[in-house]
Amino acid sequence: MDTYEDPATWLPEPARPRWTLALRFVATLLFFPLLCAFWLAVAAVLFVVGLFADAIAAVSESFGRGYMRFMDDVLDDIARLGRWCVTWPELRHEGDAAYYRARVEKVVGRWTERACAPPEPKKARPPVECEISRRDYRGVGGRYVAEVALAQGWELRPTDVRKEVRLWWSAASRPEGAGAVDAARES
């Protein structure tokens, strides 16, 4: 947490009224399938247009990159429409700090496992950055995410705690053989 940030933003969110969560949950049951269908339809249209745009992209490399960025932005914007949705666990555990502590520990632990995994040949390197969604920590606050993550070897990145907590795996900056070299010096 940076010293210039308001500490109140790192505290747990106040519990939402049960009746509003119930209404949102019912609306989610009705709206979410429509949102998924809309996302798939837009993705299909963008894919078909992309096939024709591929001919232009063969001539202009910047057009291809721009179209890919446009596709990502459009599909991400549609996915963001579902941020107000309420899941069944959120409805059941609103205001339950123990549930959210366990949830944060599980999510950060999963990211730690991925980051600690040794790199496999011909596969993508393990992730060195992650984002913990506010949905995962709203009952305990961003401060708890930071404490758990720092204890597991993560560092905080510039972040907007009202949306997510961004983390960076600090061990990724160490050279591959640094541990072996340090062990050899100690003996």
Image (tube, rainbow, N blue to C red):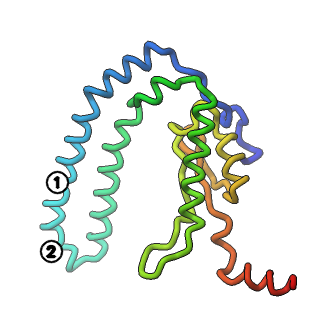
Instruction: Identify the residue at horizontal 40%, vertical 31% (top origin).
Output: 87
Q: Quadrant of the C terminus?
A: bottom right
Number of callouts:
2
In the image shown, does 129 or 42 lie closer to the viewer?
129
Q: Is residue 177 left or right of residue 85?
A: right
Which percent across, then down, holds residue 9? 65, 34
Q: For numbered disc 2, what is the local secondary structure? A: helix
Q: Is residue 86 left or right of residue 103?
A: left
In the image shown, does 99 or 57 lie closer to the viewer?
99
| Residue type marked 1 | Ala
In the image shown, does 160 or 92 lie closer to the viewer?
92
Disc on the earlier residue, 2 or 1: 1
Of discs 2 and 1, which sits in the foreground?
Answer: 1
Which percent across, then down, holds residue 173? 66, 72
Q: Which residue is mark 2?
A: 55
User: Which numbered dot is residue 44?
Assistant: 1
Residues at marks 2 and 1, CA–CA distance in whole angstroms: 18 Å
| Residue type marked 2 | Ala
From this view, report whether residue 165 is shown above or below residue 114.
above
Instruction: Identify the residue at horizontal 55%, vertical 48% (top origin).
Output: 107
From this view, report whether residue 121 is shown above or below residue 53.
below
Q: For numbered disc 1, what is the local secondary structure? A: helix
Instruction: Identify the residue at horizontal 45%, vertical 30% (top origin).
Output: 89
Within 10 Å of disc 1 (Cα), the crowding (few <14, some 14-19, many 20+) is few
Which percent across, then down, holds residue 58? 20, 79
Within 10 Å of disc 2 (Cα), the crowding (few <14, some 14-19, many 20+) is few
